Amino acid sequence: MKDFPQDIYTEPTGVDPDTLANLGPLTRMAGIWTGARGLDVHPKAPGPKKQAFVETYELQPIDPQTNGPQLFYGLRYHQHITKPDRLKTFHDQVGYWLWEPATGRVIQTLTIPRAQTAMAFGKTTADAASFELVAQRESTTNGIASDPFIEYAFKTVEYRIAVTFHPDGTWGYEQDTVMLLPGIAEPFHHTDRSVLTKVGEATPNPLTREVALARA
């Protein structure tokens, strides 16, 4: 493909080991966050149901990642959501947020324990105040994969997330997961939105700590 180099093996040299200094638009997401006013709208037999939720969203830097000449900086994340005043998990999600400086591409990978995974792509700038990522059912790159029952009952055809950074240091997201439900002609938009406040700083990635110890 013309957008890729012929040499697919040689890794970049002089890579800065400090992920926190090279996260581009993801810089303001690193750390531990809480949200106390989320809203989820999901499908039920009688119709859409609105559900308030609270969450903890932890994003920690990983070491720089290479695919031959390709270079990513990223955050490993865990999102845990409950209903207000409940201990039982309402939603649990893990994955990575990745930034590719050479292309301006942002990637989110996500896995949930209802046997579903997705990878969403978007393009933005290092100092962006907002950006949007999309995964689509038909794609072999930024795609969606589901358990057979999910594929039958809640067929997911698109996932979209918009992230916005606010002047007060908080950030928020709006998600739209588009589903096809049996017996319903129109697609259902399963939406989520939340605003997150920082409660803890990120821990530097292992390679950064190793370099610091070697220089001490």
Image: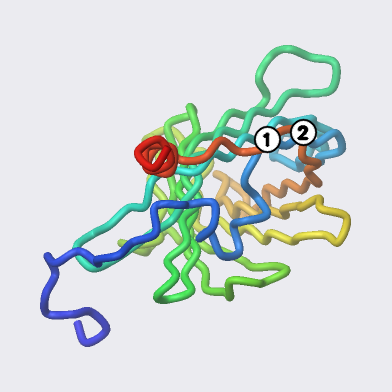
- Image-based side of 123 in relation to 177, left or right: left
Tag 1–tag 2 contact (CB < 8 Å): yes
Identify residue type, mark 2.
Val
* Residue 151 visible at all: no
Residues packed near mark 1 inside 10 Å, few (<14), some (14 to 19) or many (20 plus): many
- Image-based side of 165 in relation to 29, left or right: right
Identify residue type, mark 1.
Ile
In this rendered view, identify the residue nearer to me: 2 or 174. 2
User: Which mark, by number, is residue 20?
Assistant: none
In this rendered view, identify the residue nearer to me: 61 or 79. 61
User: Which mark, by number, is residue 199?
Assistant: 2
In this rendered view, identify the residue nearer to me: 174 or 104. 104
| Quarter occupied by the N terminus | bottom left
Tell which residue pokes out farthest to the bottom in this image. 2
Residues packed near mark 2 inside 10 Å, few (<14), some (14 to 19) or many (20 plus): few
Residue 61 at x, y percent in the picture? 50, 43
| Quarter occupied by the C terminus | top left
Label 1, label 2: how many angstroms apart (C-alpha)?
6 Å
Query: Which residue is labeled 1 in the image?
Result: 32
Q: Residue at x 71, y 40 (%)?
A: 42
Q: Find numbered disc 1 in the image and state the secondary structure of the residue it sits on.
A: strand
Q: Residue at x 72, y 37 (%)?
A: 33
- Image-based side of 186 in relation to 71, left or right: right
- Image-based side of 179 in relation to 56, left or right: left
Q: Residue at x 54, y 51 (%)?
A: 20
Q: Residue at x 65, y 40 (%)?
A: 31
